[in-house]
Amino acid sequence: MIVRLTVLFQLISFLLCTAVLHAAAPVDITNDLTEYSLGQYIETLEDPGGTLTLQDILTDKYRTQFRKSKSEIPNFGFTRSTYWVRLLVHNASSSDNRWLLETGFPLLDSIQLYVAEPGNEGIPRLSYTETTGRMVPFSKRKINHRNFIFDIPFPVGKTTEVYLRIKTDDGMIFPISLWDRDLFKITVQQGQLLFGIYYGIVLVMIFYNLFIFFSVRDFSYLFYVLYISAFGFFQLAMNGLAYQHLWPDSPWWAIHANPFFIGLSIFFAVLFSIKFLQTREVAPKVDVLFKILMVCAAILSAASLVVDYSITIVFGQLLPLACIALAIPTAIYCLIKGHRSARFYLIAWSMFFFGVVLSTLRVLGLISHNLITEHGLQIGSGFEMVLLSLALADRINIMKKEKEDAQEMLITTQKRDMDTLQKAKDEIEEANRRISLSEEKYRLLVEGSNDIIFTLDENWRFINANRALLTHLKIKPENAISGSFLDLLFDESTASSVTKHIVQEKLEQLIQTRKPVDFRTQLKSPMTIEPKEMQIRFEYINIEGKNEILGKASSVAEDELLKYFVSENQTFSIGNFLLIAEDITHRLTSNLRKYMEPRDVNLMRLGLREIIINAIEHGNLNISFMEKSEAINENRYFQFVSLRQRDPEYSSKRIHIEYSIDPEKVTYHVQDEGEGFDHHRLLNAHAENNELLSHGRGVIMTRNIFDEVIYNEKGNGVRLIKYFSRN
């Protein structure tokens, strides 16, 4: 007999030694890390019949069938197969007895552990075996913990082989970790604290609502207490604490408690929902479905005591989903029907639904096993319990509010006339207060503003203006009443009509779109020769059913960076729009203030604008002097220009502007895409042809402003130069 055992042991040792050559790379444990998640290091082998022994596993036939795990936490869902796990551990730390091996899923029925370590002459020997699981009484566990903990010595500097044989009727989930002893103790303490908080919430909800039940005799509270009590026991059984503390010597009950308490929880949850939502009155058809669900829950609880666990636990996973799938739409329906308390009920079951889905998908093997999915039920149910308790409290508040409202209605009826009179008096006082406040705000915001703030009627005539009009333009506000805003535009010799037309187009745009408009222009003052350049903003307002135009004129802010300016080169390409000509001349002359006086800058801007407008009108749009004159005289100038702008023959043509400035001079080169003109004839006609002179005053003005005005031979391009030293 001894000889046979010796031969068998040598065979096992030989096979273990051979297996090392084919196993996965070992996990190296060092002094640096205190926790190792071993999911990526283990190999698994499925044993569908559950008949393989360790001797079978170590043969060549099965040794090569192990497959490396692809996830941190292996999860094979519900299966009747037995699974073998193989793990190699190389101890590169300084201690043999520092480490604990944990299988972190307390619902595994049977776990058999085999450990082999190096022996004499390099031949491994079987050094340790242990059997545990839910089918083994908890009192026989070597380490008192809800999960399965193995105290395995790993010899320093050597590689140890670990084999696990796992069998369960629950979800085949086996998160495997290696812990430093000290860290494991700390982690256990933290876990116990979190469990204490969760079950503390459960107990508080039970006693609090039980006390209210005895006070108000509302059976909704009793059904709620029974529900969370049954659910609390289910959670204790689910995470292994019940087996550890409540029934440690009853493996059979430890296995069958889960589906039993699931059915009991659903039974009382449905009973609570029927009572709380009053489904018999609000939704009779749903009430029937709820009662059918109650029957199914009762059957599940009873069947869990006599039917195979692998069947009842599957129904135990599906029945909560059916309950939630019925509870949430019912809550929405009741909320629509005016059942205000259903709002907390709806949120509560939505949170619980989230936790149940995570837990169910984890057990079925459809999602990974992690901290969130493992404790999804605790997280969701914790929120649910608190919110359902709030729903019950809200229900009492609603009932109390309805009673108070009825009493208040009686009192209100008696005082209605007196309150109406007092309300009218208060409204008059409030109106007077608002009028006084509005006047004060007007004085502060309008009269105190440095901007010219005014209102116009739809004919652009002043209705009122603040004192800033006197400050900027030396015009008393009362003298401006009924005057036209257009009369304040600066007369720029021949360009005055263009300025007014451009401003009028902005105003027409305001009337058509009813959207605010902004533009920059020059306003005149009767007391000064120089114009005042200002930024204008118009927008529509309605006062007491009457349309008015609110305007604001602000001084153009001085560019603080201009003192650092030296030179600039820019190129622009614009379309044939007079509004753009107005805006771009401001841009092209903005930096001239570094080298020129404001009056000279204004003249430069006027001359440059004349050239650009001529390029648009007479160049790209091919408008003759006669056509322009007739259009202006007949007050249809902009309509005429608009027709030319839309004409396919001219619409694609552009004006090209090159601009450069340095401390010595500024140069502009303006070129259109038209046919050009005889600039020699125009300039020679200065003293001979008054009619031609009247149309060419813009060119003559430009020659007087700029030091050099040079046309190209075709006449569709001109170079303008101003030397600052001659300024």
Image (tube, helix red, strand yellow):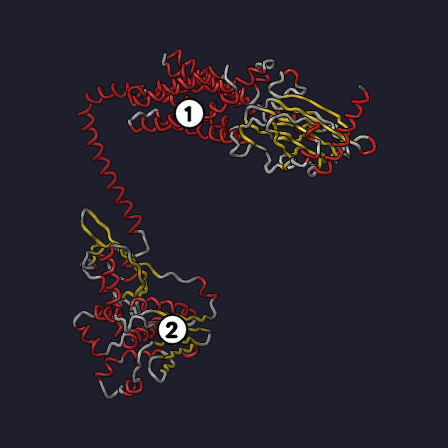
**Amino acid type assigned to the residue bearing label 2 in the image:** Ile
Q: Please identify, in this view, whether the residue under mark 2 or under mark 1 is nearer the observer.
A: 1
The answer to which of 246 and 717 lies nearer the viewer is 246
Q: Quadrant of residue 692?
A: bottom left
Label 1, on which residue? 387
The answer to which of 584 and 721 lies nearer the viewer is 584
**Amino acid type assigned to the residue bearing label 1 in the image:** Leu
Q: Residue, x 21% and y 70% (percent of image)? A: 640
Relative to 483, say whether 318 is above or below: above
Going by the image, does 659 lie left or right of 683? right
Label 2, on which residue? 657
- Name the element at disc 1: helix
On-image quarter of the C terminus? bottom left
Name the spot of residue 386 as percent of width and height, x first.
Answer: 44, 23
On-image quarter of the N terminus? top right
Lower sequence index among marks 2 and 1? 1
Relative to 51, say whether 709 is above or below: below
Going by the image, does 475 lie left or right of 169? left
The answer to which of 526 and 109 lies nearer the viewer is 109
Q: How crowded is mark 2: few (under 14 residues within 10 Å), some or many (20 or more)?
A: many
Name the spot of residue 375 as percent of width and height, x first.
Answer: 53, 28
Q: Residue, x 26% and y 64% (percent of image)? A: 503
The CA distance from mark 2 to mark 1 is 71 Å
Name the spot of residue 256 as percent of width and height, x first.
Answer: 53, 17
Going by the image, does 331 lie left or right of 464? right
Report whether residue 253 is seen.
Answer: yes
Q: Residue, x 42% and y 75% (percent of image)? A: 666
